[in-house]
């Protein structure tokens, strides 16, 4: 019988080197008197060593497999070209409800590819730029947006998965200006009332007027009414223009 204080737990701790000097001396004294315990201890040490080797082998195997998977993933990423999505979105703060986006063009130059011109429409406002090598992620992409009635956008962005291009109306339909004259004499007509929608102004001493129309009320054509006591009312549809004045002649009443 082994001494009561020499337990299996103590022998296991002895094998793993987790005993005090006093416990180590007690175990070694016990083993010197019990050959069968030595043989059992040697077998346990062998099994313990085998388990350690087995665990180490599993750990190394898992590490190698993870390393191989990471390398394979990196190669796959490098060989898979990046597809960049460009979303053309109308900035609602500069939008005209009566005139939604209809058509335009987007020119793209990226990753050494030739310049591309892509037609946009109310149905096609998302563009995919393909064949961007993954190692060129972050490289420059030159984008130029053009459309009638919109501000031109000429910008350079980084190659990435997705980018938003916010387009804005250029306000070319937001101004009506011109000059009112007498049809017979050609002289300016002062204090004539010019009315567009629910906006009205009076001409100055030179017969000039100017009306600014906010985005939400702009349209391709506007109805303009000009009235002055002693003159026939002028009522026509015209296209607003920020660069071309309206020259209107009033005829006197007889």
Image (tube, rainbow, N blue to C red):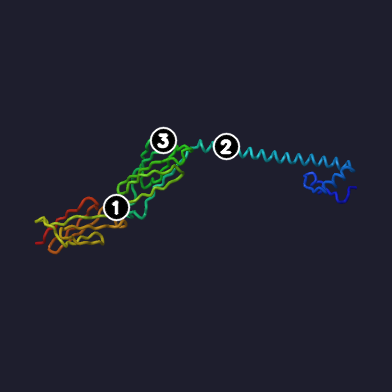
- Rounded to the nearest whole Å, what is the CA distance between mark 1 and mark 3? 36 Å
**Residue found at x 12% / y 58%:** 251
Residue 71 disc label = 2
Q: Nearer the viewer, residue 247 or 9?
A: 9
Which residue in the structure is indicated by mark 1?
Answer: 171
Rendered residue at 17%/60% (across/down):
204
Earlier sequence position, callout 1 versus callout 2 = 2
Farthest residue in the bottom direction?
Answer: 229
Q: Residues within 10 Å of mark 3 (few under 14, many from 20)?
A: few
Q: CA distance from mark 1 to mark 2?
A: 54 Å
Where on the picture, by quarter, is residue 144? top left
In the image, which is nearer the foreground, mark 1 or mark 2?
2
Can you tell which of label 1 and label 3 is closer to the viewer?
3
Please state the horizontal and vertical placement of residue 129, each as a whole percent of the image: 42, 40
Q: Looking at this view, is 194 or 16 the one in front?
A: 16
Spot occupied by residue 12 in the image (x, y as percentages of width and height)? 80, 46
Label 3 element class: loop
User: Which residue in the structure is indicated by mark 3?
Assistant: 112
């Amino acid at each position: 019988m082994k001494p009561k204080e020499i337990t299996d737990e103590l022998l296991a701790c002895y094998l793993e080197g987790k005993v005090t000097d006093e416990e180590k001396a007690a175990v070694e004294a016990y083993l010197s008197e019990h050959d069968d315990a030595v043989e059992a201890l040697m077998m346990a040490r062998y099994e313990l060593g085998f388990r350690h080797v087995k665990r180490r082998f599993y750990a190394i195997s898992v590490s190698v497999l993870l390393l191989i998977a990471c390398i394979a993933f990196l190669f796959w990423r490098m060989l898979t070209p990046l597809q960049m999505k460009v979303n053309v979105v109308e900035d609602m703060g500069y939008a005209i409800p009566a005139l939604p986006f209809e058509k335009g063009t987007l020119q793209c130059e990226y990753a050494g590819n030739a310049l591309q011109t892509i037609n946009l429409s109310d149905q096609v406002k998302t563009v995919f730029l393909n064949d961007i090598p993954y190692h060129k992620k972050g490289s420059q992409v030159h984008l130029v947006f053009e459309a009638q009635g919109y501000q031109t956008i000429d910008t350079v962005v980084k190659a990435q998965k997705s980018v938003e291009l916010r387009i804005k109306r250029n306000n070319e339909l937001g101004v009506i200006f011109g000059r009112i004259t007498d049809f017979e004499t050609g002289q300016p007509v002062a204090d004539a009332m010019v009315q567009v929608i629910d906006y009205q102004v009076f001409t100055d001493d030179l017969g000039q007027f100017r009306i600014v129309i906010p985005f939400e009320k702009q349209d391709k054509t506007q109805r303009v009414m000009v009235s002055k006591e002693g003159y026939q009312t002028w009522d026509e549809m015209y296209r607003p223009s920020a660069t071309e004045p309206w020259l209107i002649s009033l005829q006197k009443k007889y």
